[in-house]
Amino acid sequence: MARVYNFSAGPAALPVEVLERAREEMVDWSGSGMSVMEMSHRGKEFMSIAEQAEADLRELMAIPGDYKVLFLQGGASSQFAMVPMNLAGATGKADYINTGAWSKKAIAEGKRYCAVNLAGSSEDSKFTTAPGQADLALSPDAAYVHYTPNETIGGVEFPYIPDTAGVPLVADMSSTMLSRPVDVSRFGIVYAGAQKNIGPAGLTVVIVRGDLIGEPLAGTPTMFSYATQAETGSMYNTPPTYAWYLAGLVFQWLKERGGLAGMAEVNRRKAEALYQAIDASGFYTNPVDPPCRSWMNVPFTLADPNLDSTFLQEASAAGLKTLKGHRSVGGMRASIYNAMPEDGVQALIDFMADFEKRNG
């Protein structure tokens, strides 16, 4: 069976080359006589996999030496709690910027552990833009500032990194990490669920500046302490070993393609082509303020919503899968992460043009 173009927001498509290599190594990894999923996480074979993956990620993202890289479980949603548990004790206060569904979830969890100041919001615009730097009401005594650089559901992306005047900046980069270069030194913590650009679901990558690894709030579970995870090399318990291994293969795949600078150029072309097709049409609409349009998640609606189901059925038959928009937004959504080839985006554009010609 031929592979389809999978536009799922996550779990998302993985590079075919990564899947093929994993298939080759499934039963016997590097002459070990074992599958990676059978290995002891403390054995020399898996330790070499883990160390290489971290080294490759550090190289790809130019992660400074004073930052720890953690490979954890619990998804990005667990970080909604882990961040305040580990950082809020400094002042008991934190700033949050609200730009959509995932920001809201982080805010709700943050309120369980500290006093939350809503430093900025685009809710009045129905989350079709991101607040500008001048619109942010930041607190000088906040323990940290949390934001979501890219909202997967609404397709809204910050066109800048907020200036927090020295307060640690925390970013949920689940849908943008590895899509382009980023200056990690601008952040106190960067975290991401793997199932967009990193690897399969089940792994969460956390990059945390060393000086922020301190004493968590009283009552914090041992597993939720950054200090615990950093001191044990993310192996306080058995980590998600196979997902860690697959992430390592993705890191190698990215290095072979020119690193994040090379990936950024491809991602820019994909996004520009799709937005141009939408904007040139009277049949399709994207609601997001153009400077804040996501490179990774492109929502769009049809002029006649009654055609939505027909569009989805015909797209699926054409090998263009999982284009249905999130239930809270409706319409369509094309997630065009790193593993989505330019040919896939062009196939979608061609289908959209043909569908408009027949139904517009």
Image (cartoon, rainbow, N blue to C red):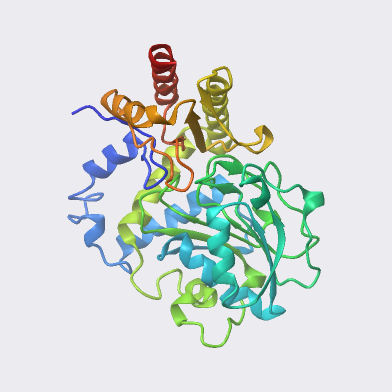
Task: Return the residue nearer the eye: 249 or 204.
Answer: 204
Where residue 116 sits, quadrant-wise, is bottom right
In the image, 233: left or right of 183?
left
- Locate residue 231, reporting x and y percent: 50, 75
> With respect to residue 221, does 18 lie above or below?
above
Q: Which residue appears at 61% of the width and 43% of the height?
A: 157
Q: Name the image quarter holding residue 128.
A: top right
Furthest-bottom residue in this view = 218
Q: Is residue 96 left or right of residue 279?
A: right
Taking depth in this image into account, of 10 and 52 the one nearest to the observer is 10
- Estimate the x, y position of residue 306 in percent, counting from the top left: 39, 30
Residue located 56% across and 88% down the image: 218
- In the image, residue 111 above or below residue 18: below
Where residue 72 appears, x then y in whole percent? 43, 65
How many numbered dots are placed on residues in this image? 0
Q: Where's residue 54, x and y in %?
A: 47, 56
Report if residue 68 is visible in the image.
no
Q: Is residue 205 left or right of residue 128?
A: left
Picture residue at 44% right of the left edge, 46% below the top = 196
Above or below residue 31? Residue 6 is above
Q: Quadrant of the C terminus?
A: top left
Quadrant for the N terminus, please: top left
Residue 55 is at least partly visible in this image:
yes
Q: Residue at x 46, y 34 (%)?
A: 336
Q: Residue furthest top?
A: 357
